[in-house]
Image: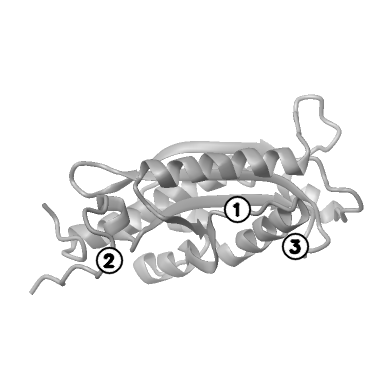
Amino acid sequence: MKPSPPEFEKDNASPMAQRFRGFLPVVVDVETGGFNCARDALLEVAAVTLTMDSNGLIIPEQTLEFHVDPFEGANIEQSALDFTGIDLDSETRLAIPEEMAMTELLQGIRRAVRQQGCTRAVMVGHNAHFDLGFVNAAIERCDIKRNPFHPFSCFDTATLSGLAYGHTVLAKTCQLAGIEFSNSAAHSAAYDAEKTAELFCNIVNRWHNLGGWPPPL
């Protein structure tokens, strides 16, 4: 027996809104100066918006990415820079102030939410609460009033990939899912967000093709 569709209160909602109860999944990755979202710098942020094709499968649509100047007084651990390979003094980094980056990022996400007929965004990330914490902290620092993301709910691809592939490391799970992954390109916000988006779509569409909601057309 195929599952019944989830209830959704809005008549004539778009297929994407019907699929995720009015939410648009937006895949986010951040690169930071440490693990503490209250005191450590946000150095890169990227988001991948998703859309749905005519077969009811979700696919990546657009990548938004920004290199970010550390906020005043931000802490930056050298170990974090060594891990990400970020050179704060590089002339090619083209970083912009945090407020500008967050404003442009959220404008793009709100636009995608409207275009997909959804009411709000929900964050997707690999260990998603880490990314959500840094995004919410930056939004608060910048005094941005209209946060398109649900304040605490998210989709965590580390958890989902543990269920679907028995592994939780992004690089290994992508390999198991047949998604090309370059360790040398990893730890850039845009690259990791795009690979996480591919993984999320892979898992959701795999469930769809196995007969989960929505049933295959």
Q: Position of residue 150 (x, y in %)?
A: 52, 63
Specify few, some or many for label 3: CA neighbours under 10 Å numbering under 14, 14-19, or 20 or more. many
Amino acid bearing label 1:
Arg
Residue 77 horizontal/vertical position (percent): 85, 55
Label 1: how many Cα within 10 Å (few below 14, some 14–19, many 20+): few
Q: Residue at x 36, y 59 (%)?
A: 22
Q: Is residue 37 above or below residue 98?
A: below
- Residues 33 and 178: in front is 33
Q: Are marks 3 and 2 in contact (CB under 8 Å)?
A: no
Q: Amino acid at mark 3?
A: Cys
Q: Quadrant of residue 70?
A: top right
Question: Which residue in the structure is indicated by mark 3?
Answer: 37
Marks 1 and 2 sit apart, C-alpha to C-alpha, by 23 Å
Q: CA distance from mark 3 to mark 2?
A: 34 Å
Camera-nearest label, 1 or 3: 1
Q: Kindly report which numbered mark, 3 or 2, lies closer to the viewer in this rendering.
A: 2
The residue carrying mark 2 is 8
Q: Secondary structure at mark 2?
A: loop
Describe the element under mark 3 as helix, strand or loop. loop
Q: Measure the alpha-carbon separation of dots 1 and 3.
A: 20 Å
Q: Which residue is labeled 1 in the image?
A: 146
